[in-house]
Image: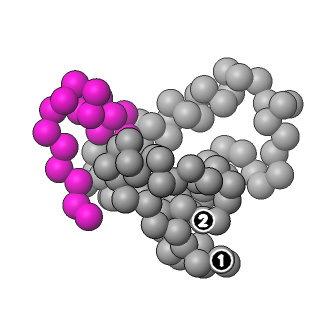
Amino acid sequence: MTYDRGTEMAEHKLFTKETKIQVYFADPYSPWQRGTNENTNGLIRQYFPRGTDFNQVPLSVIKEAERRLNSRPRKVLDFYTPSEKFYQLITNQKIALET
């Protein structure tokens, strides 16, 4: 997993220990090092422009955008949808993601 330098990963060592998933940090001001994250932000912006006050957005509108985004095939997932890959994960089906 690749993160920026935000406080959300202050416990990254514990996360790695518990999950056995290595964490990498992107250099400051280097969004290209987090390509999938930046791509996803762009997809979200199709529904909610930068600066959107989510306290003013009805939950039903957020849920619909979430449903659409999770039903959209992604190249990074071999053109599976995030929903399909998540289902494979929780049902212990084999997942073939290229790294």
- Residue pointed to by mark 2: 4
Q: Which residue is mark 1?
A: 28
The quarter holding residue 98 reads bottom left
Could you say where residue 53 lies in the image, as x and y percent from the top left?
84, 40
Relative depth, front residue between 1 and 63: 1
Q: Where 83 sits versus 8, above or below? A: above
Considering the image in quadrants, where does the N terminus appear? bottom left
| Residue drawn at the location 68% of the way across and 27% of the way down | 61
Task: Pick whichever, 33 or 72, lies toward us.
Answer: 33
Going by the numbered disc 1, the residue's amino acid type is Pro
**Amino acid at circle 2:** Asp
- In the image, residue 56 above or below residue 20: above
The reply to whether residue 46 is in sight is: no
* Disc nearer the start of the sequence (2/1): 2
* Residue 27 picture location, percent across and down: 58, 78
The total number of labels drawn is: 2
Residue placed farthest to the left in the image? 94
**42 on left or right of 24:** right
- Helix, strand or loop at label 1? It is loop
Verify whether residue 58 appears in magenta. Answer: no
Residue 22 position, x and y percent, is: 37, 59
| Disc 2 and disc 1 in contact, CB within 8 angstroms | yes
Q: Which residues are magenta?
A: 82-99
Q: Is residue 12 left or right of residue 42?
A: left
Above or below, comparing residue 94 to residue 7 in the picture: above
Packing grade of label 1 (10 A; few <14, some 14-19, many >=20) is few
